[in-house]
Image (cartoon, rainbow, N blue to C red):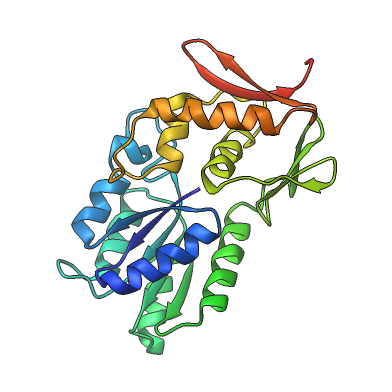
Amino acid sequence: MRVLLVEDHDELATWVAQALRALHFTVEHAPDAGSAEALLFSTHAGGGVGAAGPGSDYALVLLDLTLPDRDGLDLLAALRRRGCRVPVMILTARGAVGERVRGLDLGADDYLAKPFDLAEFEARVKALLRRSRQTELPQVACGGLRFDTVARTFSVHGEPLPLTPREHAVLEVLMSPPGRTASKDKIFASIFTLAEDTQPDVIEVYVHRLRRKLEGSGAAIVTLRGLGYLLEAAGA
């Protein structure tokens, strides 16, 4: 899952990004409102023709309000007017009741005042994503492979499946849901940021590693030439 962090304080942005990566998120950082809009409405971020909606490749936006080029609340209002439905959690030092009410009224899904406790922040992120994905099944299965969509953990025949963060991200794309083809470009866009110097062909490396780890699981990653990859029950 990709998260957009809109925060102009570099030290805080680094701290929050590290916490999110520990939860297996891919973090894209925007230091100002202009950069955030460019990412949310770019083709790379799901805003191209035929996409599910502006910013739809992001699972969550974390938004500071005191940005160098524009007030965060103005940015939030503009995003909602333009049809961006991605869940937004405001992270700000402006914790007055009036600010909270205005932020929620403009379309924020949660509001957390700085300074905040890391454990509370992580719990709120998980709760917000649970609410935004409440129509999904809590457990998704493919052969003996299971994905807990709430805890975002994988298991094989009841045992935890050890994965690196990148492997976890690739498998999550393929598992949401299994049996649906995911192009190499889509997987790449879901787990890498624009700032990273790498190419979509690196996905082949992670698919190769996952195939080895899924041996005996009853699930297999199939290559569809020219289309991408799909996850299906072995022998299906």
Query: Is 215 left or right of 40, judged from the image as shown?
Result: right
- Residue pictured at 56% horizontal, 59% vertical: 23
Q: Give the side of residue 131 with respect to residue 29, left or right.
A: right
Q: Name the residue at 51% across, 10% down.
A: 225
Q: Is residue 222 left or right of residue 115?
A: right
Outermost residue toward the top in this view: 225
Q: Quadrant of residue 224?
A: top right
Compared with residue 158, is residue 205 higher up or lower down, i.e. above or below? above
Residue 32 location (% of width, % of height): 21, 62
- Count the marks: 0
Find the residue positioned furthest to the left.
69
194 left or right of 131 in image:
left
Tell me the residue at 51%/48% (across/down). 1
Q: Residue 209 appears at what percent x and percent y?
A: 59, 31
Q: Position of residue 199 (x, y in %)?
A: 34, 30
- Outermost residue on the right side: it is 157
Quadrant assignment, res 145: top right
Up the image or down, 18 lies above or below 65; here it is above
On screen, residue 5 above or below 144: below
Q: Is residue 210 above or below residue 5?
A: above
In the image, 204 versus 80, the foreground residue is: 204
Residue drawn at x 78%, y 16% as measured from the top left: 236
Q: Nearer the viewer, residue 4 or 133?
A: 4
